Image (cartoon, rainbow, N blue to C red):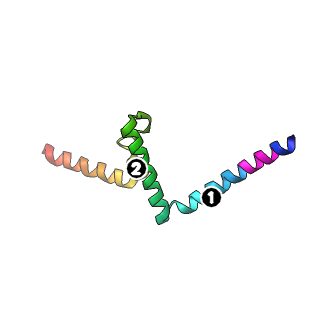
Amino acid sequence: MFDSVYFWAISSIASALLGAAALAYIKDTKLGIWGYRQFDKALDLLRDKYHIHALDQPSDAWRSQEPEIAAKIDELEARIKRLEDR
C-alpha cells in the first residue's frame, strides 16, 4: 500500500520538476512564444464568449512586465504635463 503512495508522490514531484524545466527552456523560443499567444487567444475567446470576468487582465498589467518602459512613459507624460501647464 505505502509503496504505491510513495511512488505516486515521487512521480508527481518529478513530473512537476520536469514540466517546470521544460517550460523554462521553451518560453523564450519561437515555439513557446507562439504557444503562449495561442493560449492567450483561447482564453480571450472564452472570456468574451462566456463573459468570464475572472480571466480579465488589469489594464496596467504590462507595467509589471516592462517596468523600464513604464517608467519612461511616466517621465514623458510628466514632461508633457509640465509643458502644457506653462
Drawn side of residue 47 relative to residue 18, left or right: left
Q: Is residue 8 magenta?
A: yes
Determine the residue positioned at 36% across, 39% down: 48
Drawn side of residue 70 relative to residue 8, left or right: left
Q: Which mark is residue 21?
A: 1
Q: Quadrant of the C terminus?
A: top left
Q: Amino acid at mark 1?
A: Ala
**Image x and y of residue 10, in percent:** 77, 49
Q: CA distance from mark 1 to mark 2?
A: 24 Å
Determine the residue positioned at 77% across, 46% down: 8
Indicate which disc, 1 or 2, sits on the residue closer to the N terminus: 1
Q: Is residue 82 magenta?
A: no
Q: Secondary structure at mark 1?
A: helix
Q: Amino acid at mark 2?
A: Lys
**Image x and y of residue 26, in percent:** 54, 62
Q: Which mark is residue 41?
A: 2
Q: Residue furthest front?
A: 49
Q: Are marks 1 and 2 in contact (CB under 8 Å)?
A: no
The boundaries of the magenta stretch are 6-12
The nearer-to-camera label among 1 and 2 is 2
Q: Nearer the viewer, residue 27 or 39?
A: 39
Residue 11, above or below 25: above
Crowding at mark 1 (Cα within 10 Å: few <14, some 14-19, many 20+) = few
Determine the residue positioned at 14% across, 43% down: 85
Q: Residue furthest bottom?
A: 30
Q: Quadrant of the N terminus?
A: top right
Q: Residue furthest left?
A: 86
Instruction: Provide the major secondary structure of the magenta segment.
Output: helix
**Image x and y of residue 38, in percent:** 43, 54
Q: Nearer the viewer, residue 28 or 39?
A: 39
Drawn side of residue 66 relative to residue 6, left or right: left
**Image x and y of residue 54, in percent:** 44, 35
